[in-house]
Amino acid sequence: MRKIIVLLVLLFSSICIFAVVERSPLMSIKKIFIGPMGEGDEVGRFCMLLEAELTRSGFTVVQSADSADATLSGFLVIRQDPGTLASATISLKDPTGKQIFLEDFGPSTRHSSDSDTVKNRALDIAERFRSLRDQGEKNYERALKKEKKKNRGDAPAAPVPDEETRGRIMRQRESMRDAAVSASAGASSNAPSDGSTRERALTQIAPPPPPTQTISLGQTRDEVVAILGQPQKVAQLVAKEILYYPNMKVILLEGKVADVE
């Protein structure tokens, strides 16, 4: 039950965070439908260039408004003054008709050469959409981290126990330790857990096992028998004696250990 409550609290906190931090509208726009852009000989080329630049900026241009996240429309105006100057007014609306974006694009000094102003206006629009989308994502992540940090800071700190509470905790620990010692000593449940009981329990603890003795080169036959006991079988050769044990055999040369197998 406690785990379920914790999960519900975390879920509610996450919902509150996402409710406070709003996403930029352009962050959810992936597929764009290019609608009417006015009339004129350059409008068709402008739409083709705009499709290419939007695709290069990471958007998907679709052929139907029903399958799009937003519809892009506007007006392309061409003026001869004295050369060809192109400007565009662009509107972006979601499927419900709500306007997301509206801006004018005209000749600027950002292009080194504005000879093909129709192409430059398509480039300006695509770069503007990409910039707004990327900046929206950065702002969203920054605001989300800030909100999470704020919520963590609002969590109440654990209260520090006072002197009386700390003393009670220490007494409880002592009582539990005495009870554990009494249980290990085999005392009855109603036996007092005083100092004598603790000492009696400690005296009943088995001593550590003696260190393991090993066979070393140069030991005599008597030392080997003292460690391993009498061998199961003995093989007596000319200058060699072999003592056989269950898991090993000890080879003696001139009465001393020369090898262990």
Image (spheres, rainbow, N blue to C red):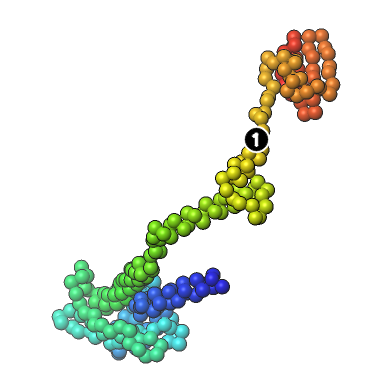
Residue at point 15% right, 80% down?
A: 82
Q: Position of residue 250 (x, y in %)?
A: 75, 20
Judging by the rendered image, the residue that carries numbered circle 1 is 207
Name the image quarter holding residue 166: bottom left
Picture quarter with the C terminus: top right
**Foreground residue among 31 and 45:** 31
Say left or right for 228 vs 74: right
Residue at the left extreme of this rendering = 82
Q: Position of residue 151 (x, y in %)?
A: 37, 70
Say left or right for 222 vs 102: right
Residue at point 72% right, 17% down?
A: 223
Say left or right for 203 vs 132: right
Say left or right for 139 vs 221: left
Residue at point 50% right, 71% down?
A: 6
Q: What is the secondary structure assignment of the residue under circle 1?
A: loop
Q: Position of residue 65 (x, y in %)?
A: 42, 87
Name the image quarter holding residue 90: bottom left
Type of the residue with mark 1: Pro
Residue at point 78% right, 23% down?
A: 229
**Foreground residue among 114 and 259:** 259
- Does the image show residue 131? yes
**Foreground residue among 212 and 125:** 212
Picture quarter with the N terminus: bottom right
